[in-house]
Structure formats: structure tokens, C-alpha cells
Image (cartoon, rainbow, N blue to C red):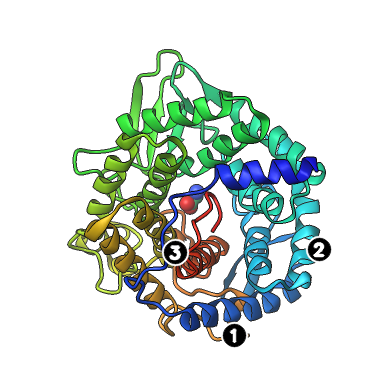
Amino acid sequence: MLALVVVTVVASACQSQSREPSDSLQLSPEFINEQLDDAVAQIKVLADSVPTDRMPRTFQGDTSVFSNTEWWTSGFYPGSLLYLYEYSGDEELLQLAKDKLAILEKEKYNKGTHDLGFMLYCSFGNALRLTGDTAAYEEILLTGAESLISRYNPTVKAIRSWEGWTYPVIIDNMMNLEFLTQVSKLSGDPKYRDIAVTHANTTMKNHYRPDHSSYHVIDYNPVDGSIVGRKTAQGAFDESAWARGQAWGLYGYVMMYRETGDETYLDFAKQIASFILDHPNMPADLVPFWDFNAPDLPEDSPYATTYKTYRDASTASILASALIEFSTQIKGDEGHDYLAQAEKILQSLSSPSYKAEIGTNGGFILLHSVGSIPHGSEIDVPLTYADYYYIEALMRYRRLLEGQPLLGGAP
Ligand code: GLY
């Protein structure tokens, strides 16, 4: 009974605005189901290659690359399995997910990373939502959230992202805030949500330029909260707009509007969406270059010759999922426009230009993502998080087709 009550609280607390199935939806149930059926088939190919104690990360030069559970992407594979279990009802996928959750659990004690939202909420959050097993998953989420907020500094008013630098906060960290808002609902303790709101406000103030593009890294002085550097780590140069960072920001502020109802976040998300979608360097298929400034790089840039036109499918996946939710938050033509852009992205990603044939690509669904060009890492490869947000976007769209409200943090 307790489990039922808690799950009801989690589910209803996560409701986004509901909508009627709409004739503005341009993608058919058959199209969406075909992509999800393919995703199920492909993740089973992937599952066959994954060692018991590892998580899939990418596939490079015909070689599968796996990670340990400390790596920031470790929650995406179990999360993808859970979404596809939700879609298919295939118990094999649930069991595969549970096997991975067992090796991931220890990360709840990890205070050395800000990525616990990705690692624990995409995985255990979905597991709790789908199974209702509070005895198995609630403590893990609460312990993980305590680990995450141990990195919060009330002077900076933000959660520290990395070690090194002085006190670096990266735009990606917006994606860990949903974990905190949900744990406040689970525990009844508002402190996690309060930190999420404060972090989002600090990021809004300091990470964004007047054109509503985001810096990647803001480095703070932890003693007085002043800014000591505005930098990039994964973008083309400090003042450039690293593509995935722009997508993390959009997703984050759409989510914060859902969680708080604060229209400041809604307005801010509109400005970010405008920077991204109206950018002159946005390709017609809406799969962004790895950095919005990449095509304009001068010849003396270290990334000019080879990497000017590399795309990042992971950015497109994140954008598709965020825009679907955004479209439910805004009535009228504006909402329909965001939905149309998400549809375009889903069509592009589902085409042979970006979607691998089943049985190829090491079992990953999407081709052509970029981890970090400046680090020479994961360039033009599949990535576990590109697949996760693509699946999430498909599942969210499926809910729209069924006239169901979206669920926060999950479709
Ligand atoms: N959070 C790391 C990345 O987006 O690459």
C-alpha cells in the first residue's frame, strides 16, 4: 500500500500539462512505434556485448568501448533499457536493467562528481517510476541526492561540477537538478529543491550571454562567489556556443518551469530556444554542428580543417526531447512550432543518415555524435546518451499521440 501511495505521489508530482491528442501531430503512431521497435532490437544487440561489470559508452573503429560505473554516462544504458521495457513490456529488458542497477548502486556514495542526476535519476528514477519498488530504490535516490548536495556552496550558490579549476560550474549541471526536485517530493524535505532553484538562478545570471547562448564553464571564487573565468572545455573557444551545452540549458530550464511554474524559466527557455533554432548555422535537418561557431572557425583554429562541419546527434536528441515537453507548456502557434521542430529532428535522426542498421554500430542506435573534439575524444561516433534522449523523445511523443500527459524526467 505504501509503495502504491509513494508511486502515485511521484507520478502525479511529475505530471506536465496534459494535452488532447492533437491534429497538429505530424508523426504517426506507426512511425514512432517502428523506431521504438528498432530500438528494442538494437539494444538487444548491444546487450549481448556488454560485460557484466561494465556499462556501454560508445563504439569506435569497430571496437566497443565500455565504462565503469563512476563514468558520468553510466546511468543511460539502464535508463534506455527501462524506457524500452516500458514501451514493449519485454521482461528481458527489465532484467537487463536490474542487473546493471545492481552494479550502479554504489555510486550513491560518490561525492566526487556532479553527474549523479544523469547516473542515478535516469536509471533508478525510472526504475522507481516503473516498478513502484520503493524498498529497492528510494533509499538509493535519497542517499545519492545527499551526495550531490554535498557539492553545493551557499556562497557561490551553485553545485560544483568538477575537481580542478577553482570552483567550476558547467552548463551541463542544469541536468542534475531534476534529480533534486524529485527527491524533495519523495522525501518531503524541500532542501534539495531549494538548492536546485538557487543553482538554476545562479546559472541563469552568470552562464548566459546577452544573445542567450551559454558559456560552458563558469569558474568561481568559492570564498566570495565572484567569477574568476568564463571558459570552455568542450567547445571550439571560450566565447563559442558549444552545441550540447545549449541543449542541456534548454532542457534544464524547460524542466525547471515544469517543476516550479516560475514563468521566468519559461521566458528564459524561449530565449535559449530562439538562439538555437534561429541560429544561421543550424543545418536544415536540425542536427546541429558540434559547436554553433564551428562552420565559421578561422583557418588558424586547431579545429578548422577537419572538424568544421561535424554534427552532434546527441545534441539533436536532447533538443527533440526538450522541445516536445516545451510544446506542451505553450499554447497556440508557438507551442506547435516547437513541436514541429522536434518532429523534424526525430525524422532526421530516424533516417539512414543518422540511424544505424540493426546489428551494426556496436548495437547503438544513432550514428554521428561528438563527445569532445578539444580532448580528441569520441568524435563522430555513437554515444549512449544520444540513444537515451532519442528514446526518451520517442516515448514522450508517443504519450502525445495517446493524449497522455508527459511525465517529468521520463516520458
Ligand atoms: N556532461 C558532459 C557532456 O555533455 O559531454
Residue tagged by mark 2? 52
- Residue 112, visible in the rendered structure: no
Residue tagged by mark 1? 358
- Helix or strand or loop: what does disc 3 sit on? helix
- Residue 120's place in the image compared with 64, above or below, is above
Question: Which residue reaches farthest top?
Answer: 224
Q: Which of marks 2 and 1 is nearer the N terminus?
A: 2
Q: Earlier in the sequence, mark 1 or mark 3?
A: 3
Residue tagged by mark 3? 317
Distance from mark 2 CB to nearest ligand 1 atom below 8 Å: no
Disc 2 versus disc 3: distance between alpha carbons?
Answer: 27 Å
- Residue 164's place in the image compared with 20, above or below, is above
Residue at horizontal 50%, vertical 74%?
Answer: 366
- Residue 314's place in the image compared with 4, above or below, is below
- Helix or strand or loop: what does disc 2 sit on? loop
Distance from mark 1 CB to nearest ligand 1 atom below 8 Å: no
